[in-house]
Amino acid sequence: MSTHILEVSGLKTYYKTRLKEKVFAVDGVDFELEEGKTLGIAGESGCGKSTLALSLMGFYFPPLHYGSGSIRIHGNDIMKLSKEQLRSQVSGREIAYIPQAAMNALNPTLRIIHFIEDILKEHRPELSKKQVWELAAERFKTLNLPEKVLKSYPNELSGGMKQRTVIAISTILNPKVLIADEPTSALDVTSQKAVIKLMKDLLDKKYIRSLVFITHELPLLYHVTDDIMVMYAGEIVERGTAEQMIFDPVHPYTKKLMGSILVPEEGMKGQKLAAIPGAPPNLKQVPPGCRFAERCTYAQDECRVGKVPIHKNGSNEYRCHFETEILKEWYAHEQS
Amino acid sequence: MKNSFVILLKSPKFMIGAILFLLMLALVLIYPQINRKDPLEMMALAFQPPDANLWLGSDNFGRDLFLELMYGIQTSIRVGLIAGVFATVIGLIIGLASGYIGGMVDNILTAITNIFIVIPSFVILILISVSINSRSSLVTAIIIGITSWPWTARAVRAQTTSLRGRDHVHIAKISGHSTPKIIVFEILPYIASYVVMAFVLQTASGILSEASISMLGLGPYNTISLGIIMNWALVFEAPVAGAWWAFIPAALSIALITFSLYMMNTGMDEIFNPKIRS
Amino acid sequence: MSNRELLIRGKDLTKVFGYGTQKTTAVDAVDFDFHKGEIISLVGESGSGKTTLAKMMMGLLKESGGSIEYKGKPRRLKSHSDRKRYWKDIQAIFQDPFSSFNLFYRVEKLLMDCIKLQGLKLSKEEQYLKMKEACSFVNLKFEELHNKYPFELSGGQMQRLMIARIFMLHPKVLIADEPTSMVDACSRSTILDMLLKLRDENEMTIIFITHDVGLAYYVSDTIYIMEKGKIVESGPAEEIILNPQHSYTRQLISDVPKIHSAWDLGS
């Protein structure tokens, strides 16, 4: 048995268009997550990060289809399970997934407790209504959510409270891994902080063992996750510890991404922000070689052909033709 | 948009409805050109059953029912279309004014619309029909039209209210466009598909309304419509005489026309309505 | 900033929605002074009334109380020609590029309308050159774009076209309502750069309406902080961000995750 709580290798998933073309939004992704660790996934919109999150659940609804690869939870490949097994054994128990805008998907005519009853009816049918209430109230109390929320209708809650409630509901079965896709992007900073606090609480109290957090807000990832993974055009281009990814990125794309961070801190004013001209490649026809070459200021002829090797910089891994020293030299040269 | 029109042609429901409707229209327009007899000419005995000569038999006056049916369908469709145009135009104007101007105007127009929705329009229809002496098919169509616009007005108002707050409308405003121009170029294109759908529905219900009041003997004079054929059959006791051919074909025709229009509407709905489309 | 020419002044500006018991005051007796060439950020969370205030400045909403002065005179928006004159000087960019475009018309029409608003009589050739120049300012190729429909473009491209529109109109004041909140970080830098360039070239006054404190700090000379319809603090950007006085401002700044200092999640 591996110590990895989640292990993904060679995962490929694609969308089928009306014209029956296959568009690989997740194109050969490998990563593993240790128990107790948190992982952030960043990237521009359309880079495949949301599709990756969705794919990790093992459920595929058209137009999304499974291509190849494996998703192992504690060594068990969930792609080998049937749909029925996935639904009853994996979803909610092993992995919970909170899609983007989940908070607006709650049926407005039902009270919050109803959603919890629904989940527990399936997974723990032995509980009575009263026991369910007690369990839910206990859980809400430990997470600093008011108990009266259980009796409320979704529309009576503020955006931030709704999002926290959704997270509390989806983790009621203590899933090992929580996958949250942009859980804070529609919220004000104050509510955003409350949501982050809740996720930290879930981890501290061991209700969840690991977290996969998807967002385009890098400063947020820096504070929330241990590791950060950057995706570009369906591939992972760099992965490393949050500290290293924010302050010492190697891949030219990550470098630019980190250079575009805006925070209200001394020294930000008057600094030149990094910009990347152009747009990510159309995934229907991915260019050969490095997928970022077209927009990369350092791209050479060799970048546009062949397979791109994976280099290491300490514990960082990145997908680029060039060694760390060469890239760093270029960056230093550019700055002077 | 050209694009959605092409998609529309691929929708089986819309195509079934449209082909059915067009075939019927072609038949009723072409047949009278071939058989140039007067539909009101008495040419046989009363209530003759169908045979090779009289395809649908004869009515109580001994007239050719098939020929009558051709003219009847023509009139019914015409009345339905005119009623549809009137209802759509009135509904569109009131809905646009109410939704775009907002405020007090909206309150007043919405109140008027609601009053018209609450009052059973069929009752108004009967009352107006009784009180007017010279009823042509055009007058009947107009009466139907002005009693059935509120639903269109409501739908248009709702759409317009939400469109009014959109940024492209703001951009048009601060680009100095006049209000009529904004309504025509920024609002109308977005609601056009709804309006066409409403028109199709209004036409179908116009045909049904015409049939209903004509059957009561309150329809247009001096013409033949499907409702009037049914009225004759009723008045001269065709059912008692066992002459099913005097009313069943007319009733089926009404069903067929409205069915084809509803099919077109459903087909369009599936394409234009994003909720169903997904 | 005080040595610069005063351009827009708001006095006691108030907006009340609804009436009777459902009355809500969205903007509550707000005062402001915006100068020529100044970049101002109006920062607030959702529901702070910042967008309502912006709509009033744009002349799209009528104020319930108070007044707006433009170039030292009370602004007049009574007749259509008054409004047209006002909008020649005051323009806007909105948050959602997808809803800023009318999906039924080609990109070209948006830029054509700018030429019409200015009342310029140009030959086909000159029109073409003018539109091409505007597109190249925002790094877009007019030759490739003019025939396209908005839904064929990306969000970043659409927002850049909106800037091209401003470039053609060169207004005195630009009100940018969350112009970058729906585009990626990398496009955001590009868009901000372009807006700053417009200010430098035309001495345009730019008013950013935003919830992003980091962005406000980065781009603006002056910051106004809004909470529940009121302006709670205003002043030079450096002072407001690095040395905030009002408790709400402090709270707002401390809630934003930063990268060089710890982020206190509280208890």
Image: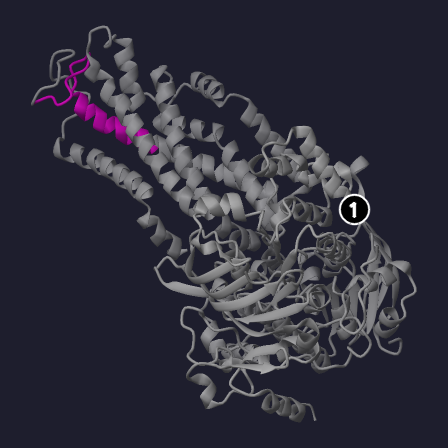
The residue at which mark 1 appears reads as A144
Q: Which residue sits at x=56%, y=88%?
A: A323
**Horizontal and vertical percent position of residue A51:** 51, 60
What residue span does the magenta drawing correspond to?
B53-78
Please tell me in which quadrant of the rendered image residue B200 appears. top left
Q: Residues within 10 Å of mark 1 (few under 14, many from 20)?
A: few
Can see residue B223? Answer: no
Q: Which residue sits at x=19%, y=15%?
A: B59
**Horizontal and vertical percent position of residue A128:** 65, 29
Which of B98/A21 is in front?
A: A21
Q: Quadrant of the C terminus of chain C?
A: bottom right
Which of C261/B125 is in front?
A: C261
**Horizontal and vertical percent position of residue B72:** 26, 26
Q: Is residue B11 left or right of residue C261?
A: left
Which amino acid is tagged 1? Asn
In the image as oriented, which residue stretches furthest toward the front? A1
- Image: A238 above or below A204: below
Q: Is residue C166 left or right of residue B14?
A: right
In the image as oriented, which residue stretches furthest toward the left? B52
Which of C146/C156 is in front?
A: C156
